[in-house]
Image (cartoon, rainbow, N blue to C red):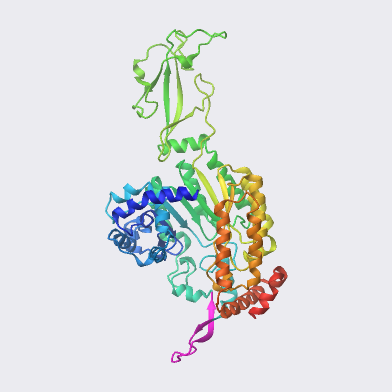
Amino acid sequence: MNDWRISEKIDKVKPLLDDISPTFCLAKWLYVQIHLPHGLTQSCYHPPAHNIPLDELEQNPSALHNTKFKIAERKQMVLGKQPPGCEYCWKIENLKNSEQISDRLYRSSEDWAAENYDYITDNEYNFNVKPAYLEVNFSHACNQKCIYCSPHLSSTWYDEIEEFGPFKLKTLGKKFNHSTTITEVDHLHNDIKYLEEQGKLPFEVRKENKVKKKDNPYVKAFWKWLPHIYDNLHHLRMTGGEPLMHKDTYKVLNYILENPSPNLQIGITTNLCPSNNSTFEKFIKILKKLENPIDNNVLKIWEKNNYLKEITYFAKNDNKNIRQKDGSYKWQNWPRFIVNDNEKVDKEIEPTLSRIDRKKIVGVFNEKNRNETTGDFFYKQLWLKPINNNWRCLGSTDFEKEGNEGIVDNFSAYEHLMLYVSLDSVGKQAEYMRYPLDFKILENNVHLILKNLTRTNITFINTFNLLSVSSIQYFLEFVHNLKNEYGFDKVTFDIPFLEYPNWLAIDILTKDFLQYMYDTEKYITEYDTFSEKEIKKVERNIRYMEDKILGENDYSLQRKNFALYIDQLDKRRNTNFLKIFPEYTEFYNLCN
């Protein structure tokens, strides 16, 4: 979206927010991220996730979003106070003489939020709100172990730590409790015991209070809750772990197929490289079906779910039409009526047509529902009323009877799907960072998606870490080629920079790595394939790197941890960092 349009939306929504309070944020009501394997929830991605109390959940599944904790924060906002969990936005808004706009305004001005303003403000702060933007994680099962990830987010990471133990790194602290000196001390990274103590491990792998995946009360509550909130959802996004490995991902997609919502935006964060090809084929198959859902089985399901009605019409020969050369009449010009059989037809279906009771229609009709004397006949049409949509005619499956012109082929069960494909580089370097990725399989799957699905776009998410820097131009060349082949808007990228773990952050690189970024800055502006937004994100990362690298910062501890981490990683995975990243040799030696 253009910058001026975003600004226009913010200018429109800000007075509405201020009318409630100077801290009011629609995202606190309408946006939710739910981590079902861990029993955690949060409003948007800035506030820290908090526990969903089981006693609240047992009373009402909407506690997945409407916890007492969140409701208390909403009350604070209505009263003009600043909930501490939203500090990210308050820091920006509390800056003096700053023109920066916080995400409170950005989020609240987006369509899914602004359209629900009356819905939120017409109710008390403590009602059980239906979210408009839902992001859900069903499982930590994942077939990759990215270098910056953790055992509480990836099952393969968990297995590796179980086998080899945590990484032995360094941090600043006191060697002894009575000491007053801060120095380097040992630190265990990705320590399963510590993660469990902090309540971060999924229930299914905890040593204490373990809960089997099939018995997870949060997953069960989600499936009870979804039918109650579905009609208000604008965005439904699934994350992981790896969603393509989760049966609940396909259960959600089938739910959408059976409950068509043509305005729904779907998002899936995926590595798009499942361990076996049959999983990917299954994924492609359900997406194709969602794009072109209509068949006899689906029509029966829609009818059972009260979305579909078969309407009977009556076409009456008024003798004003001239008989055609083949002896037939041009019946489309005849007066037509909707027939009320056992129940009255909804007034919203072709409201300009008169209704007639079947018993008032006289005459003898043959097996094709035609009066051979007058030419009058009956025919049927299927009408569908999807979620939050008006009735629309689908046509008829009975091709043999006059009046039936077949079924439409341009209806989809959803509006759009965005695949957020995680990729931090290309080739062998990407495989090292997202071990054990097979880049060629990923590349092939990307082409299969873009060739076979018309309503699906891909955004590559490059979690920009220090190992992404040397190959950033190759990554953009990869994106550029796909844009040229499939369309500039069909393929996009995002490049959020990594903050943790800090020994993998771009902050700690030496100034010679800036040249890779300067070359990339020149490259990306030479082509019109990249949007202004994409260019600005690359420029933002360059300015950030300049600030950190050229500033007077001591990164000795982070660099030491980098070398320790890479050495242990190579030993565990039988990889060779310097063979794959020879351009980092001088930096690696500096870190040792």
Q: Which of 422/93 is in front?
A: 93
Q: Quadrant of residue 54?
A: bottom left
Q: Is residue 99 magenta?
A: no
| Residue 271 coordinates in the image, percent (x, y) | 59, 57
| Residue 154 coordinates in the image, percent (x, y) | 54, 65
Q: Which of 486/396 is in front?
A: 486
| Residue farthest bottom in this picture | 178
Q: Residue at x 43, y 55 (%)?
A: 106
Q: What residue span does the magenta drawing correspond to? A: 171-189
Q: Residue at x 44, y 14 (%)?
A: 334
Q: Which quarter of the rendering shows the C terminus?
A: bottom right
Question: Considering only vertical position in the picture, is 420 above or below 340?
Answer: below
Q: Residue at x 55, y 58 (%)?
A: 537
Q: Is residue 173 magenta?
A: yes
Question: Considering only vertical position in the picture, is 40 above or below 4?
Answer: below
Seen in the image, is 20 located left or right of residue 462? Answer: left
| Residue farthest front in this picture | 97
Residue 582 in view: yes
| Residue 49 coordinates in the image, percent (x, y) | 41, 65
The count of marks equals 0
Residue 132 in view: no
Q: Which of 248/550 is in front?
A: 550
| Residue 393 coordinates in the image, percent (x, y) | 46, 29
